[in-house]
Image (cartoon, coloured by chain):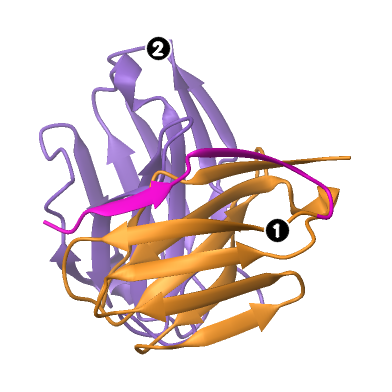
Chain colours: A orange, B purple
Amino acid sequence: ELKVEQNPLFLSMQEGKNYTIYCNYSTTSDRLYWYRQDPGKSLESLFVLLSNGAVKQEGRLMASLDTKARLSTLHITAAVHDLSATYFCAVGNNDMRFGAGTRLTVKP
Amino acid sequence: EAGVAQSPRYKIIEKRQSVAFWCNPISGHATLYWYQQILGQGPKLLIQFQNNGVVDDSQLPKDRFSAERLKGVDSTLKIQPAKLEDSAVYLCASSLSPGHTYGYTFGSGTRLTVV
């Protein structure tokens, strides 16, 4: 059964700092998704990574995928308060299995 | 384009009662998913439909949960009878096809509280 692990589960960072969220998964997949969820809201798609070595960037967020290591990273550059949310990775070729999420708080 | 529509937004029921949720996916999306998200956890896949057929329902508690997608468009998810541990947000998502490169679009969810 596909297992998806994220770390850290909780992350508190200062504005302006950089940090990386990690997503490991247990079985082969060439589809990886990153979602953002604000409290009480639904999931917003951030990135869809489709192949080994894929890198996508949007604003202060950059996601990458290493299918051989079964690892994806979500890098945050110069964090701002508006990035405070829970970030989920999800893996699967025909469906999506989610990690537990990383609850990010960006403090002034 | 219109998003994934879900109703109701909120529902409070007593344990052992029944409840139903409705989902209308994005037009043309053949694949539909129901997820259960318990507070503080990631969404858990309950069932996946391709058109009106079930692709994966391995994590659906079939003794109390049922789902259908008649005519391959709208879908309903039912719980009967509900238990306290069913309190969660039920999310519906759709995509053009399984694992589509554009990903999945989620609805706003139905927040169920069982008391």
Question: Left of B113 or right of it: where is B77?
Answer: left
Q: Secondary structure at mark 2?
A: loop
Q: Secondary structure at mark 1?
A: loop
**Which residue is located at x 48 percent, y 43 percent?**
A8
Magenta residue span: A1-16
Disc 2 residue type (three-letter): Glu
Disc 1 residue type (three-letter): Asn
- Considering only vertical position in the picture, is B45 above or below B79? below
Q: Circle 2 sits on which residue?
A: B14
Marks 2 and 1 sit apart, C-alpha to C-alpha, by 46 Å
Question: Left of B49 or right of it: where is A51?
Answer: right
- Considering only vertical position in the picture, is A101 above or below A88? above
- Residue B34: percent from left, percent from top: 35, 54
Q: Are marks 2 and 1 in contact (CB under 8 Å)?
A: no
- Which numbered disc covers residue B16? none
Q: A65 or B5, which lies in front?
A: A65
Q: B103 or B95, which lies in front?
A: B103
Q: Tag 1: Cα neighbours inside 10 Å, few (<14), some, or many (≥20)?
A: few
**Which residue is located at x 66 percent, y 39 percent?**
A39
**Which residue is located at x 40 percent, y 44 percent?**
A100
Q: Is residue A14 magenta?
A: yes
Q: Circle 1 sits on which residue?
A: A18
The chain that hosts pointer 1 is A
